Image (spheres, rainbow, N blue to C red):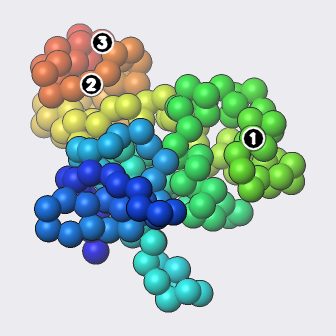
Amino acid sequence: MFHYFVGKIRHLGGETILSNDMFGIQVHYLGKQSQGEFFLYPYLDDNKKTIFYYCFDNIEQKSMFENLLKINWIWPKTAFQISQLPKENLKQALKNVDVKFFQSIPGIGPKSAKKIVLQLRWTFDVEDIQKMDIDQKLYKNIIASLKGFWYGADQIKATLQTYEGIVTKDNMPEVIKRIISQI
């Protein structure tokens, strides 16, 4: 099964194909990229005895999709559509308990929208959605690095969450220095 693919998106008939020079994969895709790196989630549909590939532009969307699948009442099609929403809009909708925002997604009615809002508010901390911009590997590397200097993981996490910028490989030393100065 594929989880990562470099290729081009093509639309043939009513199907969306992610392909490169070697082969192609039929995918569900709602993004805007026409080529580049794509992250795939293979979903096994037991009823149809087939695998559907959901295609994402970045790893954060894929992670969000995977987390949404763990929630009752959210099925793959709905999880896929929610994971494509801009994070700021999603954060605001959850903060304001905006049921109409979720009703605007095709296939979600009033009852489902209410259930989704309640489930998401209990499952995801609204602030965690905003922090999903941080690359999880970098986040874990920072914690591991500072734990080697006898700092507590909870202290590091709390201080890291107050960092207002986006953590990248390039600014990681600066972030670590700032965390040390604040602990």
Residue that label 3 marks: 182
- First in sequence, mark 3 or 1: give its number: 1
| Other-residue count near label 1 (Cα within 10 Å), few / some / many at <14 / 14–19 / ≥20 | few
Could you say where residue 70 lies in the image, as x and y percent from the top left? 56, 62
For this view, does 175 lie left or right of residue 12? left
The amino acid pointed to by label 2 is: Val
Asked if marks 2 and 3 touch (Cβ < 8 Å), the reply is: no
Residue 109 position, x and y percent, is: 83, 52
Corner quadrant of residue 101: top right
Q: Secondary structure at mark 2?
A: loop
For residue 10, which numbered disc appears in the image?
Answer: none
Instruction: Answer above or below: position of 52 versus 32.
Output: below
Q: Nearer the viewer, mark 3 or mark 1?
A: 1
* Quadrant of the snapshot with the C terminus: top left
Taking the image as shown, residue 181 lies to the left or right of residue 89, namely: left
Q: Which residue is mark 1?
A: 104
Q: Residue at position x 40%, y 25% from top?
A: 161
Q: Is residue 109 visible?
A: yes
Using the image, determine if residue 10 lies above or below residue 104. Answer: below
